[in-house]
Amino acid sequence: MKDVPLMHEIATQLRIYGITLSIDDFGEGYSSFARLREIPFAELKLDMSFVKNCANDKKHAAICQAVIQLAHNFDAVAVAEGIDNASDLQAIHRMGCDIGQGFFFARPMPRAEFVSMLRQRVSKKMAS
């Protein structure tokens, strides 16, 4: 990340081959607004520390709303990490978030279990 021109060149070359980049855990650690100018990203992942309890905490909700809008202003997809309950999912959905991930949807699982779960969901969808 120290050689910004090289990083930008690599990201641009990856995009030519259909590989896009996500900025993970936005709002925590090494993420910053400066990175948004430097990296051609397609997805901005909102850190779970802000998503948790965003349905009940006005400060968390304000940060979530701002990052979702920021992602959309950069023509990127907004992803909320760490959705663990229905109320946070509903709040994030109302804010216009594009994608959610977290234990509310599924816990980490072995590949075979994941494939089986997907097959069951597809079968249910086709039956309805």
Image (cartoon, grey):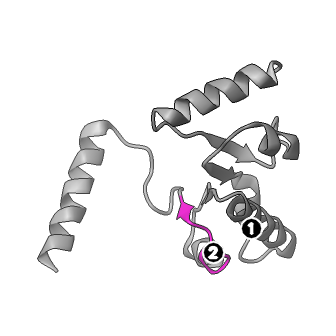
Residue 109 point in image, percent of width and height: 37, 42
Could you say which disc has been placed on residue 69 in the image?
1
**Residue 1 seen in the current view:** no
Residue 101 point in image, percent of width and height: 53, 56
Q: Residue at x 56, y 66 (%)?
A: 98
**Residue 24 seen in the current view:** yes
Q: Residue at x 57, y 62 (%)?
A: 84
Circle 1: residue type: Gln
Residue placed most toward the observer, 6 or 1: 6
Q: Residue at x 45, y 50 (%)?
A: 107
- The residue most toward the left is 127
Secondary structure found at label 1: helix
Quadrant in which the N terminus is drawn: top right
Residue 77 point in image, percent of width and height: 60, 58
Q: Is residue 34 left or right of residue 111?
A: right
Question: Badges 1 and 2: C-beta atoms under 8 Å apart?
Answer: yes
- Picture layout, residue 2 above or below residue 47: above
Residue 121 point in image, percent of width and height: 24, 64
Quote the CA–CA distance across marks 1 and 2: 8 Å
Q: Is residue 41 left or right of residue 61?
A: left
Residue stretch rendered in magenta on the structure: 92-100
Quadrant in which the C terminus is drawn: bottom left
Could you say which disc has been placed on residue 96 in the image?
2
